[in-house]
Amino acid sequence: MRTAAAAAACGVLLMSLTACGGSDGGSGGESDAQSSDRPRQAQARTVDLKRIPDVGDRLRKQIPADSRQVVTVYGEGKDSADSRIVLYTKSGSTWDQTRSWQGHNGKKGWTTDHREGDNRSPVGVFTLSDAGGVLPDPGAKLPYTRSAGFQAPRYWAKSHWHDFDYVIAIDYNRVKGTSPNDPTRPQGQSKGGSIWLHMDHGSGTSACVSLSKSGMEYLLRTLDPARHPVVVMGDKANLKA
């Protein structure tokens, strides 16, 4: 059991453990919004897109040319913990909105210079290479590590106990090809790390992005290394820059 690595989850140190979003978070409900559930007119605007909506040239140019799956996290504001997570899939030269969910990001919002313990999620484009969690592999295409080492400590608020049942590592200050709870920080500990997509508890996180259990299951079963998935994440103003 890799307890030290689990303690580092969401950019926190073993010596100062705090749950993603602190002890005041409530249980997150599953509020998936599928594009197929929307009115036909709205759906028509989310297929055959020439580019991913509301992502400006600065970040768009950082999306690898061979990436055909992009998870875009639209933060409501620089200091907001609320976000909308959208999966876009590329077919030919155009993008389709595949699915979307409401979720959360760092409880203090976003930053372009993430630091350990700042409670803000990093703005940027990051690859998605590895997954894992407490629960058995639900059929993930990404390499999946099941380990009790992901288990949130039982002295955290009960609403946080299942945060890491499923996780997808965001490749920020980590070594790709390793378990998400590997504590290695290539840029140093001060730059934070262990920033994941994980299950929502109803409020902001320490730096991760959270969404419903069913949303995590869908991403795990859908994100495919052969399609070179990435996450584009930030507050709306930084995304558009």
Image: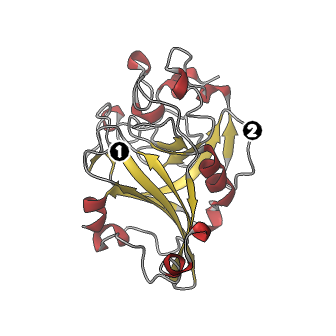
User: Which mark is on residue 136?
Assistant: 2
User: Considering only vertical position in the picture, is 192 above or below 127?
Assistant: above
| As drawn, 118 above or below 34 | above
- How many C-alpha atoms fall within 10 Å of the one at disc 1: few (<14), some, or many (≥20)? many
Tell me if 189 is positioned left or right of 224 in this view: left
Using the image as rendered, state which of residue 164 and residue 13 is in the foreground: 164
- Is 65 displayed left or right of 215 in the figure? left
Distance, label 2 to label 1, CA atoms, is 27 Å
Q: In this orientation, which residue lies closer to the viewer: 229 or 236?
A: 236
Q: Residue furthest front?
A: 39
- Colour option used: secondary structure
Residue at 51% from the left image edge and 14% from the top image edge = 155
The picture quadrant where one finds residue 198 is top right
Residue to which mark 1 is pinned: 121
User: What residue appears at the point 31 percent right and 63 percent down from the top-left corner?
Assistant: 239
- Is residue 176 visible in the rendered image? The answer is yes
Give the amino acid type for the residue marked by disc 2 in the picture: Pro
Where does the N terminus fall, quadrant-wise? top right
Mark closer to the chain start, 2 or 1: 1
Q: Amino acid at mark 1?
A: Ser
Give percent across and percent down for residue 229.
Answer: 55, 62
Find residue 57 and report its horizontal and vertical position in percent: 30, 74
- Residue at figure coordinates x 65%, y 52% from the top left: 220
From what the image shows, is residue 63 above or below residue 190?
Answer: below
Label 1 sits on a secondary structure element that is strand
Check disc 2 and report its element: helix, strand or loop: loop
**Is 176 positioned to the left or the right of 1 in the image?**
left
User: How busy is the neighbourhood of tag 2: few (under 14 within 10 Å), some, or many (20 plus)?
Assistant: some
